[in-house]
Image: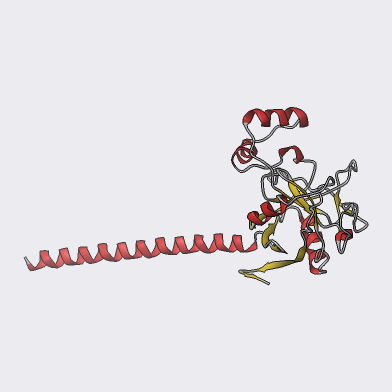
């Protein structure tokens, strides 16, 4: 009887140790996977930006797969290029546009939108970056290469579309929308007619209500707000490991 009890005790102990080791091994695997994904995330989206306006703050991150636009935007922001410029063009259901250096201290009612920095940025069209509501994109003139303005940008407001309306967009642009694009334009909204014509290089993560306030401002015939919508400052931060500096 004693021997049998001892055998049962030892068997139970072995099972407990096996379960403990199995649990510890599973925890190690889970922790390793978490560390891997955190590490990957820490190196994704290297830059984010904050636009401070009189209406409030708009926070964005810049896409890494449009490096020329990202780096140009960062370069100008670090020089405080955008500080004091205006959102000089606002169109409800479409977008707000800013970045014209001529808009600094511009006279009331002055025609704006032609200011630039003397160079263009080559187009960077990425299939997964499209004109859903809240993206940051580069303005441009009608150059055949579709190269972007060196400084002017816009944030999409857009509208929600039906399938029939998206079918019409496809016919007008002669471009097929993906299932993901269709879903976004139907549920979030955006400006699908601009896809593959203007480079998208970031998106708003917080503060779209501020964009909505700006786009709703009364405006003149040139779409300039009657009351200046000033960018007080525009700052960028870079991710270093897990920190924004």
169 or 196: nearer the eye? 169
Residue 81 screen position, x and y as percent: 83, 65
Please state if 44 lies on the left or on the right of 1 as rendered.
Answer: right
Q: At 74% from the left edge and 47% from the top edge, which residue is drawn?
A: 95
In the rendered view of the protein, which quadrant contains the N terminus? bottom left
Q: At 63% from the left edge and 69% from the top edge, which residue is drawn?
A: 241
Residue 224 screen position, x and y as percent: 82, 51
Total labels drawn: 0
Q: Measured along the vertical axis of the image, is residue 68 above or below residue 127?
A: below
Please state if 49 lies on the left or on the right of 114 as rendered.
Answer: left
**Residue 10 is drawn in which quadrant?**
bottom left
171 or 27: nearer the eye? 171
Q: Measured along the vertical axis of the image, is residue 50 above or below residue 152?
A: below
184 or 123: nearer the eye? 184
**Residue 213 is drawn in which quadrant?**
bottom right
In the rendered view of the protein, which quadrant contains the C terminus? bottom right
Please state if 226 lies on the left or on the right of 26 as rendered.
Answer: right
* The residue positioned farthest toward the left in the image shown: 1
Q: At 80% from the left edge and 59% from the top edge, which residue is drawn?
A: 86
15 or 162: nearer the eye? 162
Residue 30 screen position, x and y as percent: 45, 60
Please say which color scheme the image uses: secondary structure
Residue 12 screen position, x and y as percent: 21, 63
* The residue positioned farthest toward the right in the image shown: 118
């Amino acid at each position: 009887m004693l021997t049998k009890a001892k055998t049962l005790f030892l068997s139970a102990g072995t099972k407990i140790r096996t379960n403990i080791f199995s649990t510890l091994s599973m925890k190690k695997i889970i922790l390793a996977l978490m560390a891997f994904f955190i590490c990957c995330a820490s190196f994704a989206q290297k830059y984010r930006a904050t636009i401070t306006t009189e209406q409030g703050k708009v926070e964005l991150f810049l896409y890494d797969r449009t490096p020329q636009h990202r780096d140009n935007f960062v370069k100008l922001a670090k020089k405080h290029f955008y500080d004091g410029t205006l959102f000089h063009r606002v169109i409800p259901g479409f977008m707000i546009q800013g970045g014209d250096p001529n808009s600094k201290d511009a006279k009331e009612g002055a025609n704006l939108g032609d200011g630039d920095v003397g160079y263009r940025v080559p187009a960077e069209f990425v299939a997964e970056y499209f004109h859903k509501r809240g993206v940051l994109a580069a303005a441009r003139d009608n150059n055949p290469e579709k190269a972007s303005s060196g400084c002017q940008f816009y944030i999409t407001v857009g509208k929600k579309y039906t399938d029939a309306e998206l079918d019409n967009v496809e016919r007008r642009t002669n471009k097929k929308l993906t299932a993901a694009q269709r879903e976004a334009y139907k549920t979030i909204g955006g400006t699908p007619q601009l896809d593959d014509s203007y480079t998208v290089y970031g998106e708003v993560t917080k503060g779209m209500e501020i964009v909505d306030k700006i786009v709703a401002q009364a405006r003149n015939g040139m779409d300039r707000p009657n009351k200046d919508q000033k960018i007080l400052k525009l700052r960028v931060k870079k991710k270093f490991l897990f920190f924004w500096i």
